[in-house]
Amino acid sequence: MSGAKLFLARCRKVARLAFMGPSGLLYLWLLHRSGLFDADFYRRGNPGLNRLFRIFPMRHYILWGEAAGLCPGAEFDPQAYLDLHPDVARAGMPPLRHFLTLGRAEGRSPRKRPVPRLPHVPKTHWRIDPARKTHPYALHLHIYYPDLWGEFADRLAGLDIAIDIYVTVTWRGDETAWLIDQIRDRFPDAHVLAAANRGRDILPFLKLVNAGVFDGYDAVCKLHTKRSPHREDGDAWRRQLVRGLLPESGVRAPLSRFLADPDAAFWVADGQCYDVRDWWGSNRDKTAAVLRRVELDDLVADLRFPAGSMYWAKPLMIGMIRALRLTDDLFEVEDGQTDGTLAHAVERAIGGLARAAGQDIVQAKDLSRPPPVPRAPAFVSAFYLPQFHPIPENDAWWGAGFSEWRGVAAATSVFPGHLQPASPGALGYYDLRAPEVMQDQAALARTAGIDAFCVYHYWFGGRRLLEKPLDRLLETPESDFPFYLCWANESWRRNWDGLSGEILIGQDYSPGFERRLVESTLPYMRDPRYQRPDGHRPRFIIYRPEDMPAPEQNVARMRRAWKEAGIGPVELGAVCFHVAGDSPVPPGVFDFWVEMPPHGLVDGAAYRFGGPLGNTLGANGPAPGFAGLIYDYDAVARRSLSPAYRSGLPPDTIVGIMPGWDNTARRKARAHIARGANPATFRHWLRRLADGPLATSYRGELFVNAWNEWAEKAMLEPTEQFGRLNLDALAEFTAPPRHLALPDQTGAIGNG
């Protein structure tokens, strides 16, 4: 470069240094005010600076130093900031400018902080005796900062509710052993466990959740010794969070209101419910991946989450967190990260679980509002399948020893996050030839408010199939199993849908079939456990009424045959099937109809794969070779509420719902799948039915498809992944409003 050009270049630099423009001057003011620029540090670190730049080092940093990756001071590390927050790096924003304008308010760390080398944690048994005596509520406190224990101990000692305390402590060797002794001295009944320094406060909480420690509690409070060294107000923030959840004025009243509010999933301190759109950082993709573990998509665009990771949670949320199946090996090794880890993603994802359930995160100030009281159904039925045992016919068609459990256990996942296979929980892979199974099923059903099982009656022109469980029930009068029958009158076919494929056994409507059918029902209708929902007439349902020739005449013959047999009038219903048969049913033939999702509810807008829009799942779609259909569970739920759909149903229809639908166990690569079905979305559908269609349902009833349709994944029975959450979701709406009687004793803490 010639001397003249060099002189001009230096003049331009001097001009830029002197006249920085509005944006540069604003940055200069922010940087000066922040205290993060250390002029002496900058000069020492860059000894080759021009004399003029050494006079104005802050201006040099803004104009040229930041772009060159120079460090402004000991309290801010530009490269570490970009490493900790990759979204800033991807956006190409100057790191310090981002921190001053956005990052500090978002709580981002300006530099990596040293991670202490902690000793190896001694072996800890995370399972706790499930038969132990417990109080209604539990509290988990994770201690990372031992010096903060006293602050929390004083608050716990003053609680006005009976609560069980579980403490996890990051293991630091002798210091932690001493602290554990201190905790047990102060709270002898508390459970105290040592934890490795991994997953912050999130992983220790998840380990307790995954171990079933919080099963059976009405509510769980999650706390931790939050210091937030990246925030100047870290201590004040922690105290605000704790006061909002354990108010000094008493926990009893706000906790009672929280539990009585059906729309509340989490309770947080005032001001601690954050809109995730303002707080994504670099956590969006990981949050989406976490939610995908329970088939929840498209929630990351708009959700709220409990800031600070301290809250009260209801059992459904605890169960859904457990269903995420997040284990130690998935969490990153601690390296001072302040963003972008699985722990940060889980913190945000739980807001998605609440939203999926149709619930919200409430703040302490919201608990003064009177909670809504959803309508409860007058009578609840659930379809019941008696086929979980081998029979000679299935041995011949499908192989020796066949029952539908074979397909259920062999089902495979076809898309990322697909919840297959679905394994049974508390009842296991049962065999209905054992009479105690039906007793156990009935006991579970009662806890969920189910009044009757609608048992499929497989009758083919006089030939019965799968009748043994119900016949054995008649031989055990002590078994309290309320039921009535549904004649499953479709032909059995090789492809399981009753509509196409090789016929295995066909239905027979030869003359006199209606009288023979009635005769097959008499032993059951004469049993005192056979249900009469209106208090007088035994109930009977026909699954495919339009398959039956001359339905008006044949139904009249059935009614007459029951009367002649001494049964009297029968309350006769039919299922609203989605495919029309050959014999339309005139109005007035049946006393009522049953809505049976998903029949008639899946329209073009609901499809995610295989429908008119093709694959809308993108990279999260099914594996190559899948030729079935995938539709959105929540879209089906929304359509069931629409006036246009409901106006097309027959009068006197019982409102129906399904916990899920996925016949992968039967149809494999040609399956029909309701994506997004889980106890949270099931609960949301129930809530909306209670607010609307249930009011016009026949006799205020609710019908669930189904109790145990495992091969189509439409079941209320407990599963290995979700436990009894579907039953609990139903119980929320079948039980009368709870009036909580919190114990009066103050400081009743522990498990004694």
Image (spheres, grey):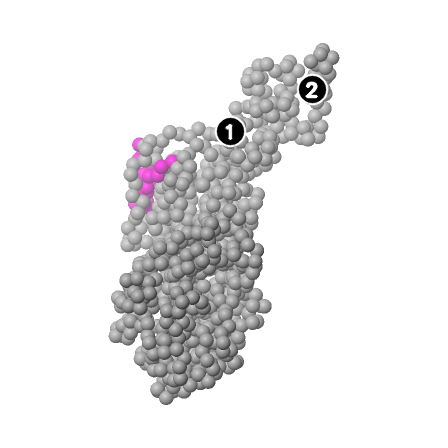
Left or right: 106 in relation to 542: right
The secondary structure type at the circle numbered 1 is helix
Disc marking residue 80:
1
The secondary structure type at the circle numbered 2 is helix
Q: Earlier in the sequence, mark 1 or mark 2?
A: 2
The residue under the point 27% across, 67% down is 433
Is any part of residue 722 visible from this angle? Answer: yes
Q: Is residue 437 above or below residue 94?
A: below
The residue under the point 59% across, 14% down is 48
Q: Is residue 150 above or below residue 383?
A: above
Per the image, is 190 magenta?
Answer: yes
Q: Which residues are magenta?
A: 174-197
Of residues 191 and 492, the one drawn nearer to the viewer in this rendering: 492
Q: Residue at the top extreme?
A: 3
The 10 Å Cα crowd at callout 2, few under 14, some 14 to 19, many 20 or more, is some
Disc marking residue 317:
none
Q: Position of residue 563 (x, y in %)?
A: 38, 87
Picture quadrant of residue 198: top left
Q: Position of residue 290 (x, y in %)?
A: 46, 46
Residue that carries the numbered disc 2 in the rendered image: 13
Left or right: 405 in relation to 12: left
Of residues 575 and 132, the one drawn nearer to the viewer in this rendering: 575
The residue under the point 46% across, 59% down is 672
The 10 Å Cα crowd at callout 1, few under 14, some 14 to 19, many 20 or more, is some
Of residues 622 and 421, the one drawn nearer to the viewer in this rendering: 622
- For badge 2, the amino acid type reads Lys
